[in-house]
Image: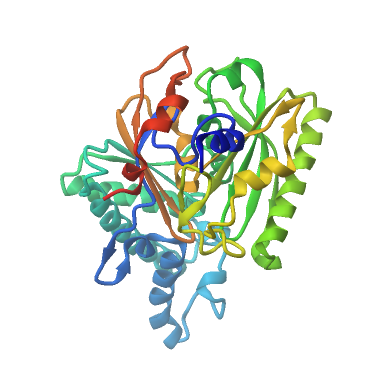
Amino acid sequence: MATDELVKTTGIAQHGASRLPSVDVDSFNIEIKDEDGFLGDRASKGAFREILEQWRKPLRKSGEDPFGDEPSDKISKKLLDAVLVGDDTEATAVVHSAIEDFAQELAYVTRRFLKTKAWAKTECIVVGGGFRASRLGEIAIARAEIILKSEGFKVDLVPIRFDPDDAGLIGALHLAPSWIFEAYDSILAVDIGGTNIRCGIVETRWKKAPDLSKAIVFKSELWRHADDEPSREAAVKRLVKMLQGLVEDAAAEGFKLAPFIGIACPGVINADGSIEKGAQNLPGNWESSKFNLPASLVEAIPGIGGHDTAILMHNDGVVQGLSEVPFMQHVQRWGVLTIGTGLGNARFTNRRKENGNGKDRDSTESGKKKDKDSKKGD
């Protein structure tokens, strides 16, 4: 895509950029394999359910399965959390056993990431994704950290601070340039996943906290597109409708909404907004050379508040990790792992602070010049 066409699409900088206002993205969406296949499959939500099933099997044979006939993939995280503090010692033991085995897998996967060139000297790893949003997830993360430290790895594993659903939207603030926070109090954000599409109005609260640590999702809408199995075109049409509704809601609430939409999307995001790979779970073919989501949205929503709409899209793991920028200022190099349908990953290096919000004004221009190969890992 020519430079002038790119600017018309984003209005600011490249999609999937390696250099962002607060951090350099050293790598994202690394796909590491071992003899059993993709490494991320060993530390996903599905992997935990498979481990839980394995611990239930011997009890089921003797008719003593505390979870009865309920399939392991249908037992809610809320119920499993309740079991952890309940009176049924056998059920508690089953869940603890599954947590321990999963923690060992998470430690193994993390160890492999830390040994790659892209993740060298990582000091802290934030763990997000839906699995983190549970007590059992928090325990597994803490146990994995203990395992790694017992092996001599000097790295902290911490649960992501914001609710993972909110983090996927709040992180979009860190795609935006500084002027947005000086002139506006909110943005639109989109988090696209293999099951859901979530859109929200993110309130910056920049005057209370210039580092964006107090940002909140004022309102969000969720669409489980997996239930409807729409075409790609129908999915984009529904997304546009959701965003248009949020623009109206922001106006009704008196927000000064920025003419900016930040998008988190699975896969390797090219500079022109196309998706190179990794979008196989989205409705329809999002990796087609003829499809460009940012361009489609700019065409459908050309302006917000009387100004041309600017859109930036990045990998969903990157965006969720970016929500942690205000809380990672005590380290230089840090990463994120998101435990969901798969295992999202990204590694960051903090950039110099300026004007109190950790953002560098020249970053959007610099981001155009940095080679995109580094974001794909080794």
Residue 328 falls left or right of residue 292:
left
Q: From this viewpoint, is residue 206 visible?
A: no
Q: Position of residue 214 (x, y in %)?
A: 56, 25
Q: Where 174 falls versus 165 (above or below)?
A: above
Model colouring: rainbow
In the image, farthest residue toward the left: 152
Q: Looking at the image, which is closer to me, 79 or 145?
A: 145
Q: Position of residue 50 (x, y in %)?
A: 42, 72
Q: Looking at the image, which is closer to me, 279 or 366?
A: 366
Residue at 45% across, 42% down: 318
Q: Looking at the image, which is closer to me, 126 or 371?
A: 371
Q: Position of residue 294 (x, y in %)?
A: 61, 44
In the image, farthest residue toward the right: 252
Please tell me in which quadrant of the rendered image residue 285 appears: bottom right
Residue at 41% across, 66% down: 47
Q: From this viewpoint, is residue 252 visible?
A: yes
Q: Where 23 falls versus 318 (above or below)?
A: above
Residue at 50% across, 62% down: 87
Residue 221 falls left or right of residue 376:
right
Q: Where 207 falls versus 158 (above or below)?
A: above
Residue 27 falls left or right of residue 224:
left
Q: Where 36 falls versus 162 (above or below)?
A: below
Residue 4 falls left or right of residue 27:
right
Q: Position of residue 204 (x, y in %)?
A: 61, 25
Q: How many marks?
A: 0
